[in-house]
Image (cartoon, helix red, strand yellow):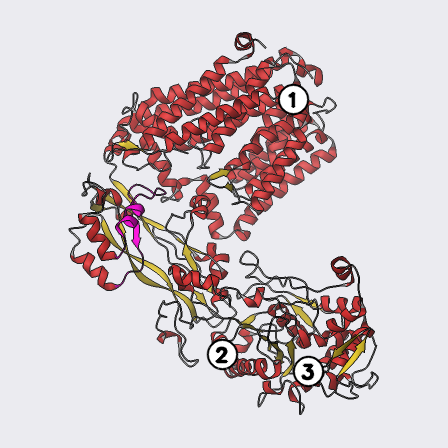
Amino acid sequence: MNLSLFVRRDLDIGLLSAICLGIGVGITTIYSASYNWDLGLAGNIYEKQIVWALLGFIAMVITMVIPLKLFYAFAYVLYGLTVTLLILVLELGDRRWFNIGPIHIQPSEFAKIMTVLVIARFLTYPNHDLTRVRAFIPPLLFVLVPILLVFKQPDLGTALVFSILILPMLFWAGARPTHLFLLVSPALTLICAFHPWMLIAIVLLLIGILLYERPRLFTASILLLVNLTVAIAAPYVWENKLHDYQKRRILTFLDPDIDKLGAGYQVIQSKIAIGSGGLKGKGFLEGTQTKLAFLPEQHTDFIFSVICEEFGFLGAFFILALFIFILWRALSIAVQTKSRFSSLTAIGLATILLFHIFVNIGMTIGIMPVTGLPLPFLSYGGSTLITNMILVGLLLNIYANRYEDY
Amino acid sequence: MQNDFTHNGIRAYRARILFGVIAFLFAILGIRLYMLQIAEWEQYRIKSEKNTMQPVIIQANRGLIRDRNGIILVDNRPSYNISVIPPRFLANIEEDKCNGLLERLGQIVDLPCETITEKLQSHNRHYYDPVKLKLDVDFETISIIEENRYDFPGVEIQIELRRGYPIFDTPSARSTEFSHAQHNASNPLVLAPHILGYVGLINASQYTHMKTRGYSYDDQIGKRGIERIFEDRMRGHKGVRYIEVNAKGREVGIFPEKTDPPISGEDLWLTLDWRVQHAAEHAFADSMRGSLIAMHPQSGEIIAMVSKPGFHPQSIRDSKAWQHLQIAPSKPLLNRSLKGEYPPASVFKMITSIAALDMGIIKADEYRLRPCTGGMVFGDRRFKCHNKKGCGTINMRQALVKSCDVFFYQLGLKVGIDDWHRYAAMFGFGELTNIDIASEGDGEARGLLPNHAYYKQRHGFWIGGNMLNLAIGQGELLATPLQVARYTSALATGQLPTPHVIKGAQGGTTSLPLSKEVIKTVRSMMIDVVNSPGGTGHRARLPDIVVAGKTGTAQNPHGEDHAWFVAYAPDENPRIAIAVIIENGGSGGSVAAPIAQKTLEAYFEHALPKPKRTDELFVFTNQ
């Protein structure tokens, strides 16, 4: 293959440059976050992140050259392996990590990509009539298994990633939005079960959509039954079955202010860091919140706060623009690709990115719960960065082979 | 469906909707950022400049562990730690070399200077968090630090609550007068250390995934036993207060209105009775290894549970003593009651008896089997009776009282492996007892109850000689002391209970599918074992109460025999069932029975003569 031709025709240079830019900003910010005024130097974690980035690039290139047909053919096998790993890590590993010497491997990271592949593989099969209930069941099971396993670790944030990624993929495959609403209605009912008016609203909406869609009587009654059970059981379980410490954990998740010491303190300090950055920021290495260490986890979960403090609204705006560009590239790859499998995969991968970005940034500015989901390409962490690079490798691979159909 | 998907117009339409969602979400982020950074910038800038508020953690009291009557078995006592806030301390040192201030501090706390430097540079912490330099220091060191406090900026004395273990000297001592046990490793006075477990410093790999649950890197966490299993209930919830610091990091004020007080952990009530536990632990001679379990037979409540040798839970703080405990050949850290597996020997003869009676093979008073001449030949081997002179022509009652092996060899052959296995399994052998302190803790052993298939798989064949050994509780048969205690309870009541240690835990019982007559007969024989003249269990007799029991002497290829004794009392409406094993103790009747007797004595002395409390203590008694 001619390399220059490859670069001109098959390489999504825009996407690749955006990723490189993101990683560069990430390393710079990690340097700043670990910089110590007293000592006048930074810790060594930014060096580690450079090593991770290099390994990530290698992983990306490898993913780029593996024929997509293989991903298609082995989707179920890969998924099975991943589920096995998730079970093994609960039993043998450290619940979340396999510790191999100094390296921690977190299988739930890779499980996200494998789950996307297996759902895409399933939805590629042409005979599924997405107006029928039974077509929804296998994809639901595909996400339910990793959700339960990851939830046991316990890693609520990552479990949520799995539950979200199915919706855009089903939509992309042709499911009707009203059906998707019916699919998620038990979850909505669960949230609304604690407010009478919201509960009435959601039930009315549900009945309205059922009347409009007119599914079979059996399906409709099952749906109503499930929602009713959830609405009645949720407050009962909350009152009678949960220990105080369990309730506190859930409440803290939803509203960090309850826990002034842990999550609440982090969010308050993060908001001060972001707000005090102003339009232009305090300047590189000048963030007082960061340097006086009021801000915890600043090189991992709260790295966005460091950017906002030191580079201000302009810096934040730049990061948001960068992410929008990356997501737009992923979407347009999904549009251009001929193969249905690749297209669906691209949508799933884009969803993973979007969810991480929105929840992480939302957390730093206090509109999302503190979940511990990292910011893609910027947060410190080997497993995450390498997984995201594999994800990008897949996107680039799909772009390069966008005319291929199988 | 398929067609409209590949049609690019439809795809582009869907992509526009998805991009609309993305744009919407990013708009929310953008607007919020605009509000924080542009609209409310002034407000946050001031907050950031004034941000001299630092959180200080207030530790929560860990829940206490009490016995069934509320007597405290584990409490909290204050101890002094010396800690350093590195940035404040290091600000006064030109280089972090071992001289001057560091050297002096090292001398006072008796730590090499390198260790201090290392500790000060540990990473997993908040910048201004104090680093604990030395835990639990004596008062002398505290006063030296206190006198020189202006020479050591950033060095602080913290009071922290640590686990304390009241001393139980004599059974007559009352709760309020307990002094605290000295925390040296050899102190044997702590009751039931294997059940209580211990707390220790959270380790690095635990910390990485526990920190989201509010643990910090130098927190204490339950490591074993009850302390570990009920960590969530007992740890409580930390509080926080905020202090104002100046630019150099010194405390200049407080914010009382922002204080979030800590919530103490839940107290845990056990079913143990410390007086019985105390008597049982002291009935063991210092050199003995073994286990004792006393259980309320109807409910499965554990009244006492001993595993010897024991250890002091505070030994974990002394790494040398701890290492010694870990490698000691007598395995003091092992909870023998749950994890020790032994051949049950003659205490298993009731199983063979029950099988024979229930199947109608023989009656208790029938003289049908061949006489014992001190042994019998089966196949090409001679199987000996422990009574070398022979027991003569006897019936089942006499055979159990004398623990005649030859009689049970013959009975075992008549019962056969399949039925024998069925009856033994009824009493829970070869199965977990599901005791509440094993579920997430250190676990329990399953024992081994072989059946026909086991021998086929393991050895490739089954020979009748195996049955002879199994009939007297030897051979490839293993049981934990807890399983044996549960079996004794079942003999006492006809129901198999689920043992538990936490008061109020739901135990549940399983009825045995046996006729009442069979159980009644076996029980009357067990009374004879203790009370008839020449009965092997006579050393467990009590003056006013009828005790029923059985001895066992387990042959052990690696050394002295293991001594077993099981008992329950009183005969009518039993209130306590006991299993004792002394490793390499010798004969069950002479070594294990007296220990059971002392425990029974203590139980009936303390637990019985309080009629008002009995209804509370024994909920399941009358059935």
Q: Quadrant of residue B509?
A: bottom right
Q: Is residue B499 above or below residue A30?
A: below
Residue on which disc 1 sits: A173
Looking at the rendered structure, the kind of residue marked 2 is Ala
Front residue (pair B21, A215): B21
Looking at the rendered structure, the kind of residue marked 3 is Met
Is B132 magenta? The answer is: yes
Front residue (pair A8, B392): B392
Is A365 magenta? The answer is: no
Give the alpha-carbon distance from disc 1 to disc 2, as whole Å: 76 Å
Q: Is residue B370 above or below residue B556?
A: below
For the point 55% across and 52% down, the residue is A241
In this rendering, position of residue A396 left or right of residue B112: right
Query: Would you say residue B258 is visible in this rendering?
Result: no
Residue B279 horizontal/vertical position (percent): 49, 79
Q: Quadrant of residue B454?
A: bottom right
Secondary structure, mark 1, is: helix
Front residue (pair A236, B424): B424
For the point 41% across and 27% down, the residue is A50
Residue on which disc 2 sits: B285
**Same-chain check, marks 1 and 2:** no
Location of the N terminus of chain A by quadrant is top right
Give the alpha-carbon distance from disc 1 to disc 3, as whole Å: 75 Å
Q: Which residues are magenta?
A: B110-138
Secondary structure, mark 2, is: loop
